[in-house]
Image (spheres, helix red, strand yellow):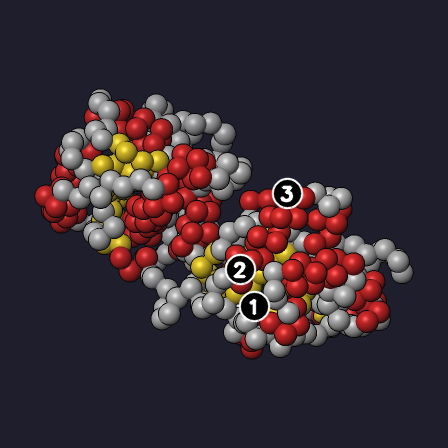
Amino acid sequence: MGGFFSSAELQLVKQPQITVPRCGSCGLDKLCNSPKIKTIGRGKRKVLIVGEAPGKDEDNEGAPFVGISGQYLRNALVEIGIDPEGDCWITNAVICRPHTDKDKNRTPTDKEVQYCRPNLFNDIARLQPNVVIVLGAVAVQSLIGGIWKEEASEAIGKWVGWQIPNHKPNMWICPSWHPSYLLRSNGDPVLARCFKQHLENAFTLKEKPWKESPPDYKKKVKVVVEPEKAAEIIYEIIRKKPKLAAFDYETTTLKPDGPKSEIDCCSISDGEITVAYPWYGPTIKATEEFLFDKEIGKIAANMKFESRWTMKQFGKKIRNLVWDTMIAAHVLDNRSGICGLKFQSYVLLGQPSYDDHISPFLRSVKQGCNEVNRVKEIGLKQRLLYCGLDSLLEITIARIQMKKMGISYE
Ligand code: SF4
Protein backbone atom coordinates (compact mmCIF):
# COMPACT_ATOMS: atom_id res chain seq x y z
CA MET A 1 0.00 0.00 0.00
CA GLY A 2 1.29 3.48 -0.73
CA GLY A 3 0.06 7.03 -0.16
CA PHE A 4 -3.44 7.62 1.23
CA PHE A 5 -5.23 4.94 -0.77
CA SER A 6 -4.81 1.19 -1.11
CA SER A 7 -4.51 -0.09 -4.65
CA ALA A 8 -8.06 -1.52 -4.37
CA GLU A 9 -9.45 1.85 -3.35
CA LEU A 10 -7.73 3.49 -6.30
CA GLN A 11 -9.58 1.06 -8.55
CA LEU A 12 -12.85 2.40 -7.13
CA VAL A 13 -12.33 5.63 -9.06
CA LYS A 14 -14.82 5.13 -11.89
CA GLN A 15 -14.17 6.09 -15.46
CA PRO A 16 -16.54 8.85 -16.60
CA GLN A 17 -19.67 7.45 -18.29
CA ILE A 18 -19.27 7.72 -22.05
CA THR A 19 -22.53 8.94 -23.58
CA VAL A 20 -21.46 9.36 -27.20
CA PRO A 21 -21.25 6.31 -29.46
CA ARG A 22 -17.81 5.78 -30.91
CA CYS A 23 -18.76 5.54 -34.57
CA GLY A 24 -15.32 6.71 -35.69
CA SER A 25 -13.68 3.68 -34.06
CA CYS A 26 -16.50 1.32 -35.07
CA GLY A 27 -17.00 2.19 -38.73
CA LEU A 28 -20.01 -0.10 -39.31
CA ASP A 29 -22.05 2.91 -40.45
CA LYS A 30 -19.77 3.21 -43.50
CA LEU A 31 -20.39 -0.37 -44.57
CA CYS A 32 -24.18 -0.66 -44.63
CA ASN A 33 -27.21 0.65 -46.54
CA SER A 34 -29.10 2.02 -43.51
CA PRO A 35 -26.67 3.40 -40.94
CA LYS A 36 -27.85 4.09 -37.39
CA ILE A 37 -31.29 2.51 -37.62
CA LYS A 38 -33.67 4.37 -35.33
CA THR A 39 -35.68 2.84 -32.48
CA ILE A 40 -39.27 2.27 -33.58
CA GLY A 41 -42.63 1.98 -31.78
CA ARG A 42 -44.88 4.09 -29.59
CA GLY A 43 -44.19 2.23 -26.34
CA LYS A 44 -47.66 2.56 -24.80
CA ARG A 45 -46.78 -0.14 -22.26
CA LYS A 46 -43.37 1.37 -21.60
CA VAL A 47 -41.53 -1.77 -22.65
CA LEU A 48 -38.32 -1.52 -24.68
CA ILE A 49 -37.24 -4.61 -26.63
CA VAL A 50 -33.55 -4.89 -27.50
CA GLY A 51 -32.18 -7.38 -30.00
CA GLU A 52 -28.71 -8.00 -31.38
CA ALA A 53 -28.07 -6.06 -34.61
CA PRO A 54 -29.76 -5.40 -37.96
CA GLY A 55 -29.50 -8.18 -40.54
CA LYS A 56 -29.74 -7.91 -44.30
CA ASP A 57 -33.54 -7.36 -44.31
CA GLU A 58 -33.39 -4.70 -41.60
CA ASP A 59 -30.55 -2.98 -43.42
CA ASN A 60 -32.58 -2.91 -46.64
CA GLU A 61 -35.71 -1.59 -44.95
CA GLY A 62 -34.07 0.70 -42.39
CA ALA A 63 -36.04 -0.69 -39.40
CA PRO A 64 -35.27 -3.22 -36.63
CA PHE A 65 -36.82 -6.70 -36.41
CA VAL A 66 -38.44 -6.82 -39.85
CA GLY A 67 -36.69 -9.99 -41.11
CA ILE A 68 -37.51 -13.59 -40.28
CA SER A 69 -36.41 -13.28 -36.61
CA GLY A 70 -38.42 -10.09 -36.31
CA GLN A 71 -41.46 -11.85 -37.68
CA TYR A 72 -41.03 -14.61 -35.08
CA LEU A 73 -40.89 -12.03 -32.30
CA ARG A 74 -43.83 -10.04 -33.64
CA ASN A 75 -45.97 -13.21 -33.93
CA ALA A 76 -45.09 -14.22 -30.37
CA LEU A 77 -46.06 -10.76 -29.10
CA VAL A 78 -49.36 -10.76 -30.99
CA GLU A 79 -50.15 -14.23 -29.60
CA ILE A 80 -49.92 -12.86 -26.05
CA GLY A 81 -52.06 -9.85 -26.91
CA ILE A 82 -49.31 -7.27 -27.42
CA ASP A 83 -49.19 -4.83 -30.31
CA PRO A 84 -45.45 -4.87 -31.17
CA GLU A 85 -45.10 -1.29 -32.35
CA GLY A 86 -48.01 0.21 -30.44
CA ASP A 87 -47.15 -1.21 -27.02
CA CYS A 88 -43.36 -1.44 -27.30
CA TRP A 89 -40.28 0.35 -28.49
CA ILE A 90 -37.96 -1.88 -30.52
CA THR A 91 -34.24 -1.49 -31.15
CA ASN A 92 -30.93 -3.37 -31.26
CA ALA A 93 -27.74 -3.33 -29.21
CA VAL A 94 -25.79 -2.44 -32.36
CA ILE A 95 -27.71 -0.28 -34.81
CA CYS A 96 -25.69 -0.66 -38.03
CA ARG A 97 -25.50 -4.00 -39.82
CA PRO A 98 -22.37 -6.07 -39.17
CA HIS A 99 -21.67 -8.41 -42.07
CA THR A 100 -18.89 -10.39 -43.66
CA ASP A 101 -20.09 -9.94 -47.21
CA LYS A 102 -23.19 -8.60 -48.96
CA ASP A 103 -25.37 -11.55 -47.96
CA LYS A 104 -23.81 -12.82 -44.76
CA ASN A 105 -24.75 -11.27 -41.42
CA ARG A 106 -22.36 -11.68 -38.54
CA THR A 107 -22.49 -11.30 -34.76
CA PRO A 108 -21.13 -7.92 -33.65
CA THR A 109 -17.78 -8.02 -31.88
CA ASP A 110 -17.43 -7.10 -28.19
CA LYS A 111 -15.80 -3.84 -29.27
CA GLU A 112 -18.67 -2.94 -31.60
CA VAL A 113 -21.13 -3.60 -28.76
CA GLN A 114 -19.16 -1.27 -26.50
CA TYR A 115 -18.87 1.45 -29.17
CA CYS A 116 -22.62 1.40 -29.75
CA ARG A 117 -23.72 1.00 -26.11
CA PRO A 118 -24.27 4.75 -25.57
CA ASN A 119 -27.05 4.65 -28.19
CA LEU A 120 -28.94 2.15 -26.06
CA PHE A 121 -28.35 4.03 -22.81
CA ASN A 122 -29.36 7.33 -24.42
CA ASP A 123 -32.58 5.67 -25.64
CA ILE A 124 -33.29 4.41 -22.13
CA ALA A 125 -32.69 7.88 -20.68
CA ARG A 126 -35.01 9.43 -23.29
CA LEU A 127 -37.81 6.84 -23.22
CA GLN A 128 -37.72 5.92 -19.49
CA PRO A 129 -39.06 2.37 -19.99
CA ASN A 130 -40.45 0.43 -17.03
CA VAL A 131 -39.20 -2.82 -18.55
CA VAL A 132 -36.39 -3.68 -20.94
CA ILE A 133 -36.57 -7.09 -22.61
CA VAL A 134 -33.10 -8.09 -23.80
CA LEU A 135 -33.01 -10.83 -26.41
CA GLY A 136 -29.82 -12.85 -26.78
CA ALA A 137 -26.26 -12.66 -25.48
CA VAL A 138 -25.32 -9.51 -27.37
CA ALA A 139 -28.24 -7.52 -25.95
CA VAL A 140 -27.44 -8.84 -22.46
CA GLN A 141 -23.80 -7.89 -22.91
CA SER A 142 -24.73 -4.41 -24.06
CA LEU A 143 -27.21 -3.62 -21.28
CA ILE A 144 -26.21 -5.73 -18.29
CA GLY A 145 -22.53 -5.51 -19.25
CA GLY A 146 -22.86 -1.72 -19.13
CA ILE A 147 -24.60 -1.73 -15.75
CA TRP A 148 -23.39 -4.72 -13.80
CA LYS A 149 -20.32 -6.49 -15.15
CA GLU A 150 -18.70 -6.42 -18.56
CA GLU A 151 -18.52 -10.22 -18.68
CA ALA A 152 -22.32 -10.41 -18.41
CA SER A 153 -22.78 -12.08 -21.79
CA GLU A 154 -20.65 -15.12 -20.96
CA ALA A 155 -23.61 -17.55 -21.03
CA ILE A 156 -27.07 -16.44 -22.09
CA GLY A 157 -28.49 -19.62 -20.54
CA LYS A 158 -27.99 -18.31 -17.02
CA TRP A 159 -29.75 -14.99 -17.73
CA VAL A 160 -32.95 -16.05 -19.44
CA GLY A 161 -36.15 -15.86 -17.44
CA TRP A 162 -35.02 -13.56 -14.61
CA GLN A 163 -36.90 -10.36 -13.89
CA ILE A 164 -34.15 -8.16 -12.53
CA PRO A 165 -35.18 -5.12 -10.45
CA ASN A 166 -32.35 -2.95 -11.73
CA HIS A 167 -31.36 0.01 -9.52
CA LYS A 168 -29.90 2.53 -11.96
CA PRO A 169 -31.69 3.08 -14.26
CA ASN A 170 -34.76 2.17 -12.24
CA MET A 171 -36.32 -0.48 -14.51
CA TRP A 172 -36.90 -4.19 -14.83
CA ILE A 173 -34.52 -6.11 -17.05
CA CYS A 174 -35.98 -9.30 -18.51
CA PRO A 175 -33.58 -11.39 -20.60
CA SER A 176 -34.59 -14.14 -23.01
CA TRP A 177 -33.17 -15.84 -26.07
CA HIS A 178 -32.87 -14.10 -29.40
CA PRO A 179 -35.60 -15.27 -31.81
CA SER A 180 -32.90 -16.40 -34.29
CA TYR A 181 -31.82 -19.00 -31.70
CA LEU A 182 -35.38 -20.30 -31.48
CA LEU A 183 -35.54 -20.48 -35.28
CA ARG A 184 -32.27 -22.43 -35.34
CA SER A 185 -33.71 -24.82 -32.75
CA ASN A 186 -36.18 -26.13 -35.34
CA GLY A 187 -39.28 -25.10 -33.48
CA ASP A 188 -38.36 -26.81 -30.20
CA PRO A 189 -41.74 -26.56 -28.42
CA VAL A 190 -40.27 -26.26 -24.92
CA LEU A 191 -38.01 -23.37 -25.92
CA ALA A 192 -40.84 -21.69 -27.80
CA ARG A 193 -43.15 -22.00 -24.79
CA CYS A 194 -40.49 -20.66 -22.40
CA PHE A 195 -39.78 -17.74 -24.74
CA LYS A 196 -43.43 -16.78 -24.83
CA GLN A 197 -43.64 -17.17 -21.05
CA HIS A 198 -40.66 -14.83 -20.61
CA LEU A 199 -42.40 -12.23 -22.76
CA GLU A 200 -45.68 -12.68 -20.92
CA ASN A 201 -43.99 -12.36 -17.53
CA ALA A 202 -42.26 -9.16 -18.64
CA PHE A 203 -45.58 -7.60 -19.62
CA THR A 204 -47.05 -8.31 -16.17
CA LEU A 205 -44.62 -5.73 -14.74
CA LYS A 206 -46.64 -2.56 -14.95
CA GLU A 207 -44.46 -0.22 -12.91
CA LYS A 208 -40.84 0.44 -12.22
CA PRO A 209 -39.32 -1.80 -9.51
CA TRP A 210 -38.70 1.09 -7.09
CA LYS A 211 -41.35 3.74 -6.35
CA GLU A 212 -38.73 6.04 -4.89
CA SER A 213 -35.06 5.18 -4.68
CA PRO A 214 -33.75 1.60 -4.49
CA PRO A 215 -32.35 0.40 -1.15
CA ASP A 216 -28.79 1.41 -0.43
CA TYR A 217 -27.45 -1.68 1.33
CA LYS A 218 -24.06 -0.07 1.89
CA LYS A 219 -25.65 2.49 4.21
CA LYS A 220 -27.05 -0.31 6.39
CA VAL A 221 -23.65 -1.78 7.19
CA LYS A 222 -21.99 -0.67 10.43
CA VAL A 223 -18.28 -0.76 9.78
CA VAL A 224 -16.71 -0.89 13.25
CA VAL A 225 -12.93 -0.96 13.51
CA GLU A 226 -12.75 -0.79 17.31
CA PRO A 227 -13.08 -4.39 18.60
CA GLU A 228 -14.74 -3.39 21.91
CA LYS A 229 -17.48 -1.46 20.14
CA ALA A 230 -17.98 -4.24 17.59
CA ALA A 231 -18.24 -6.85 20.36
CA GLU A 232 -20.97 -4.77 22.04
CA ILE A 233 -23.00 -4.81 18.82
CA ILE A 234 -22.52 -8.57 18.43
CA TYR A 235 -23.82 -9.09 22.00
CA GLU A 236 -26.76 -6.80 21.18
CA ILE A 237 -27.66 -9.13 18.31
CA ILE A 238 -27.27 -12.20 20.54
CA ARG A 239 -29.55 -10.67 23.18
CA LYS A 240 -32.21 -9.96 20.54
CA LYS A 241 -32.29 -13.69 19.72
CA PRO A 242 -33.27 -13.25 16.07
CA LYS A 243 -34.61 -16.43 14.51
CA LEU A 244 -32.14 -15.94 11.67
CA ALA A 245 -28.79 -14.21 11.23
CA ALA A 246 -26.19 -14.47 8.47
CA PHE A 247 -22.45 -14.37 8.99
CA ASP A 248 -19.45 -14.22 6.70
CA TYR A 249 -15.68 -14.48 7.05
CA GLU A 250 -12.96 -12.93 4.90
CA THR A 251 -9.80 -14.98 5.11
CA THR A 252 -6.22 -14.85 3.92
CA THR A 253 -6.39 -18.28 2.25
CA LEU A 254 -9.19 -20.36 0.79
CA LYS A 255 -8.72 -23.25 3.21
CA PRO A 256 -7.69 -22.83 6.84
CA ASP A 257 -4.78 -25.27 6.93
CA GLY A 258 -1.78 -23.28 5.72
CA PRO A 259 0.82 -21.67 7.99
CA LYS A 260 -0.42 -18.21 7.02
CA SER A 261 -4.14 -19.03 7.04
CA GLU A 262 -6.11 -16.64 9.21
CA ILE A 263 -9.52 -15.00 9.45
CA ASP A 264 -9.10 -11.35 8.55
CA CYS A 265 -12.56 -10.02 9.38
CA CYS A 266 -16.12 -11.11 9.94
CA SER A 267 -19.64 -9.75 9.69
CA ILE A 268 -23.02 -10.65 11.17
CA SER A 269 -26.43 -9.48 10.01
CA ASP A 270 -29.93 -10.17 11.28
CA GLY A 271 -31.32 -7.95 8.52
CA GLU A 272 -31.82 -5.01 10.88
CA ILE A 273 -28.38 -4.76 12.43
CA THR A 274 -25.39 -5.52 10.24
CA VAL A 275 -21.96 -5.24 11.77
CA ALA A 276 -18.59 -5.83 10.12
CA TYR A 277 -15.45 -5.93 12.23
CA PRO A 278 -11.79 -6.98 12.25
CA TRP A 279 -10.93 -10.36 13.74
CA TYR A 280 -9.11 -9.52 16.95
CA GLY A 281 -9.60 -8.80 20.61
CA PRO A 282 -13.09 -9.26 22.13
CA THR A 283 -14.78 -9.71 18.73
CA ILE A 284 -13.50 -13.30 18.57
CA LYS A 285 -15.13 -14.30 21.87
CA ALA A 286 -18.35 -12.46 20.95
CA THR A 287 -18.47 -14.22 17.56
CA GLU A 288 -17.94 -17.56 19.29
CA GLU A 289 -20.98 -16.90 21.49
CA PHE A 290 -23.02 -15.98 18.42
CA LEU A 291 -21.96 -19.10 16.50
CA PHE A 292 -22.77 -21.46 19.35
CA ASP A 293 -26.04 -19.85 20.40
CA LYS A 294 -28.59 -22.63 20.00
CA GLU A 295 -31.58 -20.38 19.29
CA ILE A 296 -30.25 -18.20 16.48
CA GLY A 297 -30.51 -19.91 13.09
CA LYS A 298 -27.33 -19.26 11.12
CA ILE A 299 -27.18 -18.51 7.42
CA ALA A 300 -24.08 -18.72 5.24
CA ALA A 301 -23.48 -18.30 1.52
CA ASN A 302 -21.23 -21.34 1.37
CA MET A 303 -21.66 -23.31 4.53
CA LYS A 304 -18.70 -25.62 3.83
CA PHE A 305 -16.32 -22.68 3.88
CA GLU A 306 -17.68 -21.06 7.05
CA SER A 307 -17.97 -24.44 8.83
CA ARG A 308 -14.40 -25.44 8.06
CA TRP A 309 -12.95 -22.13 9.24
CA THR A 310 -15.10 -22.23 12.39
CA MET A 311 -13.96 -25.76 13.17
CA LYS A 312 -10.34 -24.71 12.76
CA GLN A 313 -10.81 -21.60 14.90
CA PHE A 314 -12.96 -22.99 17.74
CA GLY A 315 -12.63 -26.76 17.37
CA LYS A 316 -16.39 -27.36 17.23
CA LYS A 317 -19.33 -27.23 14.82
CA ILE A 318 -21.55 -24.18 14.38
CA ARG A 319 -24.86 -24.64 16.21
CA ASN A 320 -28.15 -24.35 14.40
CA LEU A 321 -26.78 -23.73 10.90
CA VAL A 322 -30.04 -23.63 8.98
CA TRP A 323 -29.52 -22.16 5.53
CA ASP A 324 -26.98 -22.04 2.71
CA THR A 325 -27.92 -19.53 0.01
CA MET A 326 -25.81 -21.36 -2.59
CA ILE A 327 -27.51 -24.70 -2.02
CA ALA A 328 -30.94 -23.07 -1.92
CA ALA A 329 -30.23 -21.23 -5.19
CA HIS A 330 -29.34 -24.57 -6.77
CA VAL A 331 -32.46 -26.26 -5.43
CA LEU A 332 -34.62 -23.48 -6.87
CA ASP A 333 -32.88 -23.37 -10.25
CA ASN A 334 -30.28 -25.93 -11.28
CA ARG A 335 -28.59 -23.93 -14.04
CA SER A 336 -24.84 -23.62 -13.66
CA GLY A 337 -23.17 -20.34 -12.79
CA ILE A 338 -26.11 -18.79 -10.95
CA CYS A 339 -25.63 -19.81 -7.32
CA GLY A 340 -22.97 -17.30 -6.28
CA LEU A 341 -23.93 -14.51 -3.90
CA LYS A 342 -23.03 -11.69 -6.31
CA PHE A 343 -25.12 -13.09 -9.17
CA GLN A 344 -28.08 -13.82 -6.87
CA SER A 345 -27.78 -10.32 -5.38
CA TYR A 346 -28.06 -8.79 -8.82
CA VAL A 347 -30.86 -10.91 -10.27
CA LEU A 348 -33.01 -10.96 -7.12
CA LEU A 349 -32.26 -7.56 -5.59
CA GLY A 350 -30.74 -5.53 -8.42
CA GLN A 351 -27.69 -4.95 -6.20
CA PRO A 352 -25.01 -3.30 -8.37
CA SER A 353 -21.70 -5.09 -8.54
CA TYR A 354 -19.73 -4.39 -5.37
CA ASP A 355 -16.75 -6.71 -5.67
CA ASP A 356 -15.02 -5.63 -8.90
CA HIS A 357 -12.33 -3.73 -7.02
CA ILE A 358 -12.03 -6.41 -4.30
CA SER A 359 -12.14 -9.74 -6.10
CA PRO A 360 -8.62 -9.61 -7.63
CA PHE A 361 -7.29 -9.24 -4.08
CA LEU A 362 -9.21 -12.27 -2.82
CA ARG A 363 -7.47 -14.55 -5.30
CA SER A 364 -4.05 -15.85 -4.40
CA VAL A 365 -1.26 -15.09 -6.85
CA LYS A 366 -0.20 -18.74 -6.89
CA GLN A 367 -2.64 -21.59 -7.42
CA GLY A 368 -3.57 -23.50 -4.29
CA CYS A 369 -6.07 -23.50 -1.46
CA ASN A 370 -3.48 -22.57 1.15
CA GLU A 371 -1.80 -19.85 -0.92
CA VAL A 372 -2.14 -16.40 0.60
CA ASN A 373 -4.31 -13.81 -1.15
CA ARG A 374 -3.86 -10.03 -1.05
CA VAL A 375 -6.90 -9.18 1.07
CA LYS A 376 -4.84 -7.09 3.47
CA GLU A 377 -3.79 -4.77 0.66
CA ILE A 378 -7.34 -3.43 0.66
CA GLY A 379 -7.97 -0.62 3.13
CA LEU A 380 -9.56 -1.95 6.35
CA LYS A 381 -12.82 0.00 6.04
CA GLN A 382 -13.24 -1.12 2.43
CA ARG A 383 -12.83 -4.79 3.27
CA LEU A 384 -15.18 -4.50 6.25
CA LEU A 385 -17.81 -2.85 4.09
CA TYR A 386 -17.47 -5.62 1.51
CA CYS A 387 -17.70 -8.29 4.22
CA GLY A 388 -20.74 -6.60 5.83
CA LEU A 389 -22.56 -6.36 2.52
CA ASP A 390 -22.08 -10.10 2.05
CA SER A 391 -23.88 -10.89 5.33
CA LEU A 392 -26.69 -8.42 4.74
CA LEU A 393 -27.31 -9.69 1.21
CA GLU A 394 -27.12 -13.30 2.40
CA ILE A 395 -29.95 -12.87 4.88
CA THR A 396 -32.00 -10.82 2.41
CA ILE A 397 -31.60 -13.48 -0.29
CA ALA A 398 -32.21 -16.33 2.17
CA ARG A 399 -35.58 -14.80 3.08
CA ILE A 400 -36.56 -14.56 -0.60
CA GLN A 401 -35.49 -18.16 -1.15
CA MET A 402 -37.45 -19.36 1.90
CA LYS A 403 -40.54 -17.54 0.66
CA LYS A 404 -40.19 -19.14 -2.78
CA MET A 405 -39.92 -22.57 -1.15
CA GLY A 406 -42.73 -21.94 1.33
CA ILE A 407 -40.40 -22.41 4.31
CA SER A 408 -40.61 -20.26 7.40
CA TYR A 409 -38.15 -19.96 10.29
CA GLU A 410 -39.49 -16.64 11.56
S1 SF4 B 1 -22.94 0.43 -34.91
FE1 SF4 B 1 -23.22 2.08 -33.44
S2 SF4 B 1 -21.17 2.74 -32.90
FE2 SF4 B 1 -21.04 1.54 -34.80
S3 SF4 B 1 -21.14 3.06 -36.38
FE3 SF4 B 1 -23.21 2.33 -36.07
S4 SF4 B 1 -24.10 3.75 -34.57
FE4 SF4 B 1 -21.89 4.06 -34.55
Q: Give me the residue at 14% from left, 42% from top.
A: 241
Query: Residue 191, how many percent across, how many down?
Result: 65, 45
30 or 270, which is in the foreground? 270
Give the left or right position of residue 224, taking residue 385 as reference.
left
Label disc, if present, on residue 47 of the rendered structure = 1
Label 2 sits on what residue type? Answer: Ala
Q: Give me the residue at 18% from left, 37% from top.
A: 296
Q: Give me the residue at 14% from left, 38% from top.
A: 286
Label disc, if present, on residue 267 of the rendered structure = none
The correct choice, above or below, for 126 with respect to 275 in the image is below
Q: Is residue 62 visible?
A: yes
CB within 8 Å, label 1 to label 2: yes
Q: Give me the residue at 81% from left, 68% from top.
A: 59
Residue that carries the numbered disc 3 in the rendered image? 190
Gap in angstroms between the C-alphas marked 1 and 2: 8 Å
Tell me which numbered mark, 2 or 3, is placed earlier along the sequence: 3
Residue that carries the numbered disc 2 in the rendered image? 202
Label 1 sits on what residue type? Answer: Val
Name the outermost residue toward the right: 102
Ligand 1 rendered quadrant: bottom right
Query: Residue 278, how many percent across, how many down?
Result: 24, 43
Element type at mark 2: helix
Q: Residues within 10 Å of mark 2 (few under 14, many from 20)?
A: many
Res 249 quadrant in image? top left
Q: Residues within 10 Å of mark 1 (few under 14, many from 20)?
A: many
Label 3 sits on what residue type? Answer: Val
Res 264 quadrant in image? top left
